[in-house]
Every structure is written in C-alpha cells, then in structure tokens.
Image (spheres, rainbow, N blue to C red):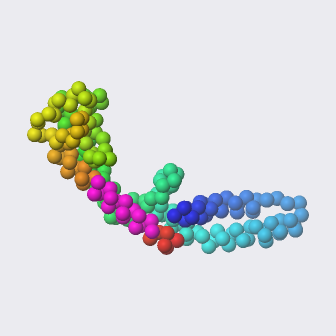
Amino acid sequence: MLSLVRVYQVVLKLPLLLETLEGVQCEHKEHKKFIDEIYTKPFQTVNDNLVKYGEMVGSTLDPEELENHNYAIKLGYDERLQALADKLVEIRDSLDAEYRATGKDLDLDLDKKLHLENSQNYGYCFRLTENDAKVIVRNSKYIELGSVNFKTKKLKALSMDHQETTHEHQWTQGGLVKEVVSIA
C-alpha cells in the first residue's frame, strides 16, 4: 500500500515539475532543446500514462487519512463501508446517551465521578471513583465488573455491537484496500 501511495504522491507532483521544466529560460536554443528531450518529454509521457492511475487512487483513498499516514478507503466509495461507518456513529451516539442516562440515574457528575471508557478487558464500561463505587453495589440494574467498573445491560449490548461493527468495518476496509492495490 505504501508504494501505491508513493506513486500517487509523485503523480500529484508531476504537473508542477513539468510546469517548472517548461518554464526554464535558456540563452541558447540548444540548451532548451536538450532539457526538453532529456527531461520534459519523458516526464510528460510518464504524466500522461499515470493520469488514470492518479484519478483512481484519488477517488478511492481518503486524503485526510493519508495525511495521518493511514491508508483508508473513502467512505462514499463503497456503500457497505459507508453503512458500517454510519452504524458506528449511531452506536457512539447511543453510548453517549447511555452514559448521560446512567449519570443522571446515579446522580453523578459526568466530568468528575463517572467515566465511559473502552477497556481492553471489558469493552465499553463505566468507571467510578473508589469512593463512589458503593452506589452500584447490590443494584440489579448494574453489572459489576470490578471494584470500580460496571455496565448496564444496554451498555453491554452496545459494546458488543460496537466491537462487531468495528471488526466488520476493518475487514471491509482491508478487502477494499487489497482490491484497489490489485487494480493499481
């Protein structure tokens, strides 16, 4: 994938190089002819051959992700990928709503006392301070995961849905990247 991106970056720079070469001023016509024969014409041929390549890569890769050295397909390029990305946004919105509802239910300050985090061990879960953990003890609404971590049934379902959708999104993204590389 890196070589695909590097060639694409060259394709983006070639027109500027050609413009510079064409703008070279020489005292002698032979010098200008030499530059044209040795540099300008070969680079123009390469540029002409790579225009379609540049269009294909430019229409499929996400330029914002490229800036961060991530190689990702544009969401609008594939309907399945777009649907999965939209579903992830919905899940995140639902996670936020559950976080706010739980904070309200427990009457806890969301910024200081209750935290929503994506734990490597538990997936999405809530974390309380040690002092506030007593509010969930022996309360059937909450699933205790440890001394300060817990979930609600809804958060458990959202966490699983998020994990599955993220996996499917990554798998789809990877398949599309392989397809683009193969075509390129």
Q: Residue furthest front?
A: 147
Determine which quarter of the picture holds residue 27. bottom right
Nearest to the observer: residue 95 or residue 46: 95
144 to the left or right of 43: left
Nearest to the observer: residue 159 or residue 72: 159
128 to the left or right of 66: left
Image spot of residue 148 (x, y percent) = 24, 35
Q: In the rendered image of this protein, does residue 159 appear above or below residue 16?
A: above
Q: Which residues are magenta?
A: 163-178
Determine which quarter of the picture holds residue 40. bottom right
Q: Residue furthest right?
A: 28
Asked if one can make out residue 9 in the rendered structure from this viewpoint, the answer is yes
Q: In the rendered image of this protein, does residue 41 appear above or below residue 94?
A: below
Image spot of residue 153 (x, y percent) = 16, 46
Question: Is 2 a magenta residue?
Answer: no
**How many discs appear?**
0
Which residue lies at the image location 57% right of the left edge and 64% below the top edge?
A: 3
